Image (cartoon, rainbow, N blue to C red):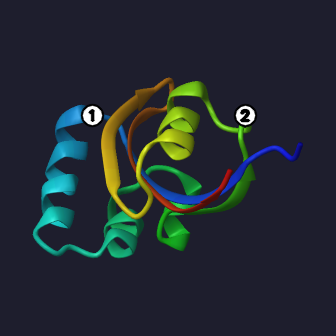
Amino acid sequence: MATPTACARHILVKTREEAERIKKRIAIGGDFGKLAKQFSICPSGKKGGDLGEFRKGMMVKQFDTVVFTKPVLTVHGPIQTKFGYHLIETIYRND
């Protein structure tokens, strides 16, 4: 059986408070990609937070859990990992 894959984008910041402020901006119509370019400390921020397609198990556990179990096309978080706080949006998933 093939390993599930998904495509996601995220915004990574240092504090929960910053992640919550950005999430509120998205909720009132802020553009996820533009906010990722502006605030994300991950190199993917330059691409609007786009991580491309990846297999289950390639990301840290907390990130993987969100991408492979939570509803797609919904912004989830803040999710804490060893890297900081993420806002995560799964674009699609192939289970």
Secondary structure, mark 2, is loop
Q: Check whether the beta carbons of the residues at disc 2 and disc 1 lie within 8 A of each other.
A: no
Give the image location of residue 81, x and y in percent: 47, 27
Q: Amino acid at mark 2?
A: Gly
Disc 2 to disc 1, C-alpha distance:
25 Å
Q: Label 2: how many residues lie within 10 Å, few (<14), some (14-19) or many (20+)?
A: some
Give the image location of residue 68, x and y in percent: 57, 43
Q: Which residue is mark 1?
A: 15
Residue 9 falls left or right of residue 18: right
Q: Quadrant of residue 29?
A: bottom left
Which residue does the image show at 44% across and 58% down from the upper left?
Answer: 72
Q: Is residue 95 above or below residue 29?
A: above
* Mark 2 or 1, nearer chain start: 1
Q: Amino acid at mark 1?
A: Thr
Question: As drawn, which residue projects farthest toward the front?
Answer: 1
Residue 10 falls left or right of residue 64: left
Q: Quadrant of residue 6?
A: bottom right
Give the image location of residue 82, x and y in percent: 50, 23
Secondary structure, mark 1, is loop
Q: Label 1: how many residues lie within 10 Å, few (<14), some (14-19) or many (20+)?
A: few
Residue 6 falls left or right of residue 22: right
